Image (cartoon, helix red, strand yellow):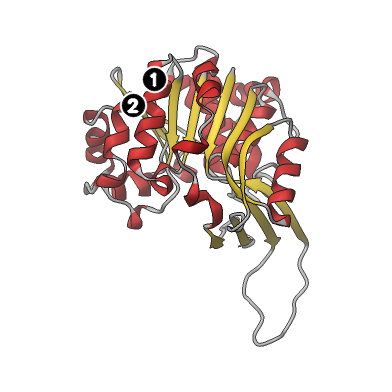
Amino acid sequence: MNVVTMGVHVLDVLVRPVEAIPEGQGATLVEDIRMTAAGTAGGTALTLAKLGASVRSAGAIGTDPTGDMLVQLLRRAGIDTEFLVRRGDTATSASVLPIRSNGDRPSLHLLGANITYGLDDVPWDAVAAATHLHLGGPELIGVDVAARILSYAKEHGTVTSVDLLAPGVLGSFEQIEAALPHIDHLLPNEDQVLGFSGEPDLAAGVRKLREAGVGVVAVTRGGDGALVVSADGSETVPAFAVDVVDTTGCGDAFSAGYLRGVALGHAPVRAAVLGCAAAALVAQGLGSDHGDFDLTAAEEFANSGKPRA
């Protein structure tokens, strides 16, 4: 699997556990503070690399120390960062995530350079040569830009997938409509399906996305697993029962596991099982890069792990 992960790259600073911010200039002790690469492109790249894919990242980051750290973390994971463009006038996107004891993760986020990525930055030859293109956060670069990139990939036989970044409440169908006919696999969460489709329930939202041209819609639903809808029908895939430490990066890990399964020739439902397994492995520690696992370990977990009741 030769994949280009394009779009949102973020440096996450995670602090755990945090139940409340101290008043005034007060202080409190925490158990862990760490940094990791993240984002709908960067986080997905991390888990894809663990699962044995050859990964090249493409996106926009700053020339600041935050960008330097992000590049270092991606390279340490075995990801080719040649196609990350550096902006001297814009900061690298970053988030501060105070993780609660139950794994919830409110965030403080800086959009940064991600929104500056455009057609002049795209490594077109690499996209054409890749087996897969995963575009994370197309709504940030504009639907017309995203549609052009995805259509080019499809014209050259590259399998396309998309994950959204914005919460559903900020979404609209116009933000993604033009790109939908060029997407083989759309990997949103339930809130995004409802928000971006404008429909009142999940089934209607997925139906609208597929009628607009998407091949397969695999919807993540947190502890309820995933819903996979394709021309063959609709099927629910349960999540795995694990002790959750942090849900950061679980959606990106699902995307990575699902796409790796697709590359291995799995049917979408079976690919979603591998996606849920990857998400469960990441959820047991802090940050998008948690877990010392490879494809064999993830497949073994997918086959033997305990589904959530």
Q: Which mark is residue 54?
A: none
User: Which quadrant of the figure has residue 229?
Assistant: top left
Residue that mark 2 sits on = 182
Give x and y (percent) for residue 241: 58, 39
Given residues 285 and 34, the one toward you in this image is: 34
Residue that mark 1 sits on = 154
Relative to 166, is 127 above or below? Answer: above
User: Mark 1 near mark 2, Cβ–Cβ under 8 Å?
Assistant: yes
SS under mark 1: helix
User: Which quadrant of the figure has residue 252?
Assistant: top right
Q: Residues within 10 Å of mark 1 (few under 14, many from 20)?
A: some
Is 260 on the left or on the right of 135, as rendered?
right
Q: How many marks?
A: 2
Mark 2: which amino acid? His
- Report if residue 157 is visible in the image: yes
User: Which quadrant of the figure has residue 57?
Assistant: top right
Relative to 63, is 280 above or below? Answer: above
Mark 1: which amino acid? Lys
Given residues 122 and 287, the one toward you in this image is: 122
Give x and y (percent) for residue 149: 41, 30
Is 11 on the left or on the right of 203, as rendered?
right
Q: Residues within 10 Å of mark 2 (few under 14, many from 20)?
A: many
Give x and y (percent) for residue 15: 70, 62
Relative to 262, is 205 above or below? Answer: below
Give the residue displayed 36% in from the left and 31% down from the top: 148
Give x and y (percent) for residue 204: 22, 39
Given residues 153 and 165, the one toward you in this image is: 153
- In the rendered structure, which disc, 1 or 2, sits on the residue that comes first in sequence? 1
Alpha carbons under labels 1 and 2: distance apart: 7 Å
Give the residue displayed 42% in from the left and 52% down from the top: 166
Give the residue displayed 62% in from the left and 29% down from the top: 56
Is 46 on the left or on the right of 69, as rendered?
left
